[in-house]
Image (cartoon, grey):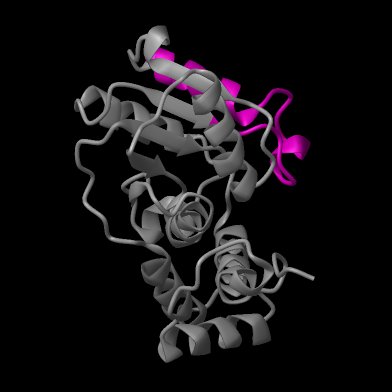
Amino acid sequence: MITEKVLAEARKLWDYHHMHHTPAVSDCILVLGSVDLRVADRGAELYQQGLAPFIIFSGGLGGVTRRMFTEPEAELMARIALDRGVPSEAIFIENQSTNTGENILFTQRLLADKGLHPQSFLLVQKPYMERRSYATFKKHWPEKDLLVTSPQLSFDEYANEDVPLEQVINLMVGDLQRIRIYPAKGFQIPQDIPDAVWAAYERLVEWGFDKHLAK
């Protein structure tokens, strides 16, 4: 049950997961795929603002989306961008990755194959995955400059039919756990987690929001 107490603790995680970066002119926009295709709209919006000369959409079919989509996330996102007026020659597609680490590694390969060597990236991800995406990118590509942004939605605005509120909270809890445990596995750079945020995580797990925890 989602009570006011649950919402209060969930907002602490939501705020922590945001990097609070301000988008700026970069060499390219990198949009990471997921169940939330609103990231494609955000990427197209940034392109239309003139913040980068091209967009990379990265994503195959992951653990969640393979049960929902019949084609790769990147292909779906690219169509959204085309509908938003992004020219096809400004769009690159990486459609094989199944997790955030592969998003980065396969994008590296794509850019190398095309002879492109951008230094600065404007990465677009779901709001509650900003920090984990940042930590993963900097692990695999530490020499690059990185800003992270997401669809400009508040916690109260974010949940919808595709991603219900209970699922959002479970995903945020799972992502915070991964921020804690993944550096030791070599997947991410370490990120400081304030005591109040970790306490909120522990309460939410105790209250049953443990459906997305890593085994």
> Considering the image in quadrants, where does the C terminus appear?
bottom right
Asked if residue 173 is positioned above or below residue 34 in the image, the reply reads: below
Is 46 left, or right, of 14 in this rendering?
left
Camera-side residue: 157 or 60?
60
Q: Is residue 80 magenta?
A: yes
Region of the chain picked out in magenta, as a range: 58-83
The image position of residue 13, as x and y in percent, is: 45, 73
| Residue at left offset 33%, top offset 13% | 85
Q: Foreground: 20 or 168? A: 20
Does residue 41 appear in the picture of this structure?
Answer: yes
Q: Residue at x 29, y 31 (%)?
A: 27
Q: Nearer the viewer, residue 135 or 20?
A: 135
Numbered disc total: 0
Q: Quadrant of the N terminus?
A: bottom right
- How far from the left and from the top, in percent, is residue 79? 50, 16
Quadrant of res 25: top left
* Residue 39 % position (x, y): 44, 38
Is 99 drawn above or below residue 187 in the view shown?
A: above
Q: Based on the displayed image, in which of its 4 quarters is residue 35 positioned?
A: top right
Q: Position of residue 138 (x, y in %)?
A: 45, 56
88 with respect to 6 (left or right)? left
